[in-house]
Amino acid sequence: MKQTKYSAKDEQELMAFVWSPALSNDPYKFVMAMFPWGKAGTPLAHFKGPRRWQRRVLQTIANHIVKGQIFDLNEVMQLARASGRGIGKSALVAWLVLWFVSTRIGATAIISANTEDQLRKITFAELSKWTAMALNEHWFEVTGITLNPAKWLCTAIERDLQKGTTYWGAIGKLWSEENPDAYAGVHNHDGVMVIFDEASGIPDSIWSVAKGFFTEPTPNRFWFAFSQGRRNSGYFFEIFHKNRDRWDQDQIDARDVEGTDPKVYEDIIDEYGEDSDEARVEVYGLF
């Protein structure tokens, strides 16, 4: 079991910093503050911060939060991005989860993917990697497809703040198209975030059940969907078509993303053709 690695005074200062409006209301500031960007001897030694498209998403979320506070709104934020391959979707998912569970005591993040392998070997592997680099990495423990607050932290929260921690953390939620009702069951007044990774492969019945997660009238409700556009049908496809007014949505050409290898995308276009489905899905961020 992890223990706090700071003195009591330093730990209190860290908590005050993480739970401050500056970070809880702005995931971009959280990401910049909590990871060792540019620090020698770390995996981020040669990185200055998120890529432009990631930064725009984080700032869009901050704008949603500020708007809700100004106009006293409790709207569910729904944001979707379709893109080519390799642009950093899994990293963004990890940041969003860590921001949400770090800044909102008691809140629940639910993460699903198109397959169990994607969820275990990519989505949660990425979450584990970024948790290990976070300033508050000792707050959480990643095991399999769950991220739970450390026992010492739960004890402190329940003792000092008299707040329950039973539903606090992130869970990877599997689904069955034959039994979609089994996907239901999560409600949390402290906040709910749902993330669909490789969302194009998640069937409509699961999207329908997921809507029920947001019945508590709290401002801390976020639904994010990220994917390549591998199917010309289904709920993710319709977000960019008949349901486009209900979601903040955008399509991202991987060639426009800094920090990627343009040769990979050129090879796909050369091999399959400019108008091929492979180029549309893997490169252009189209369906």
Image (spheres, grey):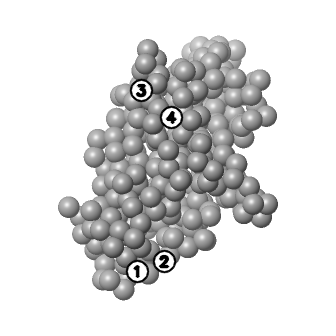
Between disc 3 and disc 1, the foreground one is: 3
- Dividing the picture into quadrants, the one containing residue 166 is bottom left
Q: First in sequence: mark 4 or mark 2?
A: 2
Q: Which mark is residue 197?
A: 4
The residue under the point 49% across, 70% down is: 18
The amino acid marked with disc number 4 is Asp
Question: In front: 40, or 60?
Answer: 60
The residue furthest left is 1
The amino acid marked with disc number 1 is Gln
Task: Rate crowding at label 3 as few (under 14), some (14 to 19) or many (20 or more) other CA atoms within 10 Å.
Answer: few
Q: First in sequence: mark 1 or mark 4?
A: 1
The amino acid marked with disc number 3 is Ala
What secondary structure is marked by label 3? Answer: helix
> Is residue 78 positioned above or below 266 on the image?
below
Residue 285 percent across, percent down from the top left: 65, 29
Q: Which mark is residue 12?
A: 1
Real-space Cα separation, disc 4 to disc 3, in angstroms: 19 Å
Q: Quadrant for the C terminus, please.
A: top right
Task: Rate crowding at label 4 as few (under 14), some (14 to 19) or many (20 or more) other CA atoms within 10 Å.
Answer: many
What secondary structure is marked by label 2? Answer: helix
Between disc 1 and disc 4, the foreground one is: 1
Q: Is residue 89 left or right of residue 248?
A: left
